[in-house]
């Protein structure tokens, strides 16, 4: 009998790979959690209509790449090809518009597309994604971009580049499409035959053509970015200013097209030079029209998703996420054990990362240990009623009452 193998385009996650995925997840939890994103999981399959309406009837994903089947009752279901439409459905279904906005959610789940498998492209793959729903500001877009950049950097992903653009409103886009189509028709002589053949289907593809003649012709083609107007321009300018302020490098790419229909305004893609053909590590953008598309009230939103397999190809050995140590307690006298133990418990109850000397080190050894752990503060408890609290960043040391140690750290770490 022949052996049964995993279906084409799928893979087993064996222990070494599972360990790397766990490291990735802990970084995502830390970075997204610190920015106020909370985890959500939605079902593996949804009504086919959700993706047809959400992702867009005309997209490759809906046209060619969905695993769809009928259930017992003849309803068409689809293994989720992406996470944004399901998260929006859940937002509407659970009345999350009643919560303080924006509702910031993140997920780490598997998705399914019947694409031709190759390195970095699978039929079942995992994404980590973040969505901020109910916020229209450019700060939301910039914050999301910074979060993905931070995640990729924390994981040590190599050769990362960011491409950024804005699509404006659907109206701007439609007018631009007409203008570009007319341009291409008027310059058919300077275009490769396969580009001419696709003019009506997808005029934007002409920007991606490899041959020299087409490239030369396309240099004079109008770009969508040049056609943005009014608030679209203001929004995009602000996103760029915020990223510039943070020294986050990006390339403006007016030809950036994403494979999903729901985008408005800001769009972006992170790529890695180490990945070859499937270089897209993660991408996203603003999708202000999607909620209405799904039958809900107009709700601005923005988000991204990044492929776990591609991140791990670009960052094969992600470093273990550091656990921040806000306080290290040094025991400097025979009576210090009990108050020291109590102080660490109180600090942990207040949400601080706190550690106590447990190995019986000398005073000098304890101070060195606090330093090695990267502790933000060290509290030295002797036999005196007051505790010495040292700010390890500034080197400043103050004497405080035992009960003021935790509030001082909480205040200090907020100021920092
Ligand atoms: P997407 O660009 O289709 O966006 O997918 C995001 C990432 O998922 C890609 O950059 C890639 O790393 C990974 N990916 C996609 N398809 C495959 C595949 N067949 N095999 C392996 N990895 C793959 C979305 O899915 C949007 N929902 C992103 C978003 C969230 N936009 C707004 N919010």
Image: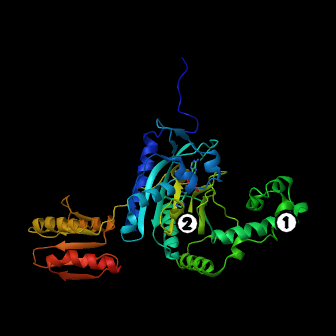
* Quadrant of the image containing the C terminus: bottom left
Ligand 1's quadrant is bottom right
Identify whether 389 is placed above or below 14: below
Residue 236 horizontal side relative to residue 197, left or right: left
Q: Nearer the viewer, mark 2 or mark 1?
A: 2
Q: Is residue 137 visible?
A: yes
Image point (20%, 76%), residue name: 405
Q: Residue furthest right?
A: 189
Residue that protrudes farthest toward the top in the picture: 1
Q: Is mark 2 within 8 Å of ligand 1?
A: no
Q: Dot 2: what SS?
A: loop
**x, y percentage for residue 250?**
61, 70
Tell me the quadrant of the picture where the N terminus can be found.
Answer: top right
**Residue at the (26%, 76%) spot, across then down:** 409
Residue 226: horizontal and vertical position, in percent? 72, 76
Q: Secondary structure at mark 1?
A: helix
Give 400 or 137, whichever is nearer the viewer.
137
Comparing 136 with 8, the one in front is: 136
Residue located beneath label 1 in the image: 217
- Tell me what residue is drawn at x 50 percent, y 76 percent: 137
Vertical relation: 239 (above or below) 77: below
The answer to whether any part of residue 253 appears in the image is: no
The first of marks 2 and 1 along the sequence is 1
Q: Which mark is residue 208?
A: none
- How much space separates mark 2 and mark 1, taking CA atoms? 34 Å
Q: Residue furthest front?
A: 73
Write down the residue under mark 2. Answer: 289
Query: Does the numbered disc 1 mark a residue whose Cβ is under 8 Å from ligand 1?
Result: no
């Amino acid at each position: 009998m022949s052996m049964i193998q995993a279906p084409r385009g799928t893979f087993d996650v064996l222990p070494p790979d599972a360990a790397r995925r766990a490291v990735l997840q802990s970084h995502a939890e830390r970075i997204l959690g610190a920015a106020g994103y909370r985890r959500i999981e939605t079902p593996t399959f949804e009504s086919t209509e959700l993706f047809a309406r959400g992702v867009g009837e005309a997209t490759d994903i809906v046209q060619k790449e969905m695993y769809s089947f009928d259930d017992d009752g003849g309803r068409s279901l689809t293994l989720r090809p992406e996470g944004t439409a399901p998260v929006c459905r859940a937002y509407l279904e659970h009345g999350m518009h009643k919560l303080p906005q924006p509702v910031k959610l993140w997920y780490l789940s598997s998705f399914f597309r019947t694409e031709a498998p190759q390195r970095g492209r699978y039929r079942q793959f995992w994404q980590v994604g973040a969505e901020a729903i109910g916020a229209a500001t450019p700060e939301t877009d910039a914050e999301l971009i910074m979060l993905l950049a931070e995640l990729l950097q924390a994981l040590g992903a190599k050769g990362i580049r960011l491409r950024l653009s804005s699509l404006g409103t659907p109206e701007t886009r439609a007018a631009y499409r007409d203008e570009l189509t007319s341009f291409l028709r008027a310059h058919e002589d300077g275009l490769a035959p396969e580009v001419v053949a696709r003019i009506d289907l997808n005029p934007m593809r002409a920007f991606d053509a490899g041959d020299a003649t087409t490239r030369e012709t396309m240099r004079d083609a109008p770009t969508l970015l040049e056609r943005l107007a009014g608030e679209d321009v203001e929004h995009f300018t602000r996103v760029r200013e915020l990223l510039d302020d943070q020294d986050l490098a990006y390339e403006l790419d007016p030809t950036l097209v994403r494979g999903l229909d729901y985008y408005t305004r800001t769009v972006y893609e992170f790529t890695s030079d180490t990945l070859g053909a499937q270089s897209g590590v993660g991408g996203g953008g603003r999708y202000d029209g999607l909620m209405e598309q799904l039958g809900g009230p107009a709700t601005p939103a923005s988000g991204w998703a990044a492929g776990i397999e591609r991140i791990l190809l670009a960052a094969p050995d992600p470093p273990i996420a550091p656990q921040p140590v806000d306080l290290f307690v040094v025991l400097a006298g025979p009576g210090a054990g009990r108050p020291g133990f109590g102080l660490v418990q109180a600090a942990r109850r207040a949400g601080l990362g706190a550690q106590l000397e447990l190995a019986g080190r000398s005073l000098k050894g304890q101070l060195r240990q606090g330093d090695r752990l990267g502790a933000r503060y060290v509290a030295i408890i002797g036999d005196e009623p007051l505790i010495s609290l040292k700010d390890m960043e500034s080197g400043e040391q103050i004497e405080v009452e035992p009960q003021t140690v935790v509030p001082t750290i909480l205040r200090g770490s907020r100021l920092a």
